[in-house]
Image (cartoon, rainbow, N blue to C red):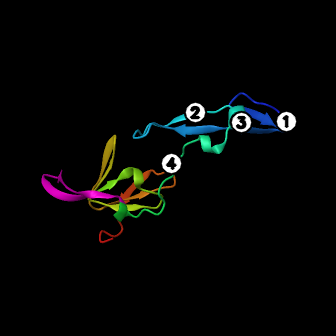
Amino acid sequence: MSATCYSPSCIFDGAEISCAADMLYQGQSYIVEVWIPLASVARRKASNFSVRALQVDATLKDIVLGVRRVWRNGDWCSAQIYDRLRLIFGAIVLGSTNLEKPDSTTFVDPGLAGEVDGYRNLILALSDDENR
């Protein structure tokens, strides 16, 4: 079946087909979903789209930005600083930790562990092993 579809979503042989891209400006974290007309996608070569993939082989050691003293519970303590945008699925960070990105900082308290899920959310929970 051949057809041209100029809307973001079309039905072909009973199946709905749509195309969208999650887009953001470099350095910003607000994502906008942009629907793309299927006809324009069909005419373009994949090389027209610029995609930056996450570095999947990065370890926590690779994304350390340093150590900083932070004020916590009326006293100073040391906190490891990580680049939050480079944390990948399955990464686990233990408190005291600062996770920094251009628009925010997350502090993980001692006794807590943060694990990055498949959507790159940071899930905080009590740490099983404070010596990890």
**What secondary structure is the magenta-colored segment mainly?**
strand
Please name the residue that numbered disc 2 is placed on: 34
Front position among marks 2 and 3:
3
Which of marks 4 and 1 precedes in the sequence?
A: 1
Q: CA distance from mark 1 to mark 2?
A: 25 Å
Image quadrant where residue 132 sits: bottom left
Q: Which residue is at 75% across, 38% downward?
A: 16
Magenta residue check for 64: yes
Q: Furthest residue to the right?
A: 1
Which of marks 2 and 4 precedes in the sequence?
A: 2
How many residues crowd mark 1 within 10 Å: few (<14), some (14–19), many (20+)? few
Amino acid type, residue under disc 3 in the picture: Arg
Amino acid type, residue under disc 4 in the picture: Arg
Q: Which residue is at 39% across, 62% downward?
A: 92
Viewer-side residue, 89 vs 75: 89
Which of marks 3 and 2 precedes in the sequence?
A: 2
Residue 54, labelled with which disc? none
Please name the residue that numbered disc 4 is placed on: 52
Which of marks 4 and 3 precedes in the sequence?
A: 3
Q: Are marks 3 and 1 in contact (CB under 8 Å)?
A: no
Residue 17 place in picture, x, y as percent:
73, 38
Q: Which residues are magenta?
A: 63-80
Asked if residue 100 is positioned above or below residue 3 in the image, the reply reads below
Q: CA distance from mark 3 to mark 4?
A: 22 Å
Please name the residue that numbered disc 1 is placed on: 2
Front position among marks 1 and 2:
1
Magenta residue check for 46: no
Please name the residue that numbered disc 3 is placed on: 43
Front position among marks 3 and 4:
3
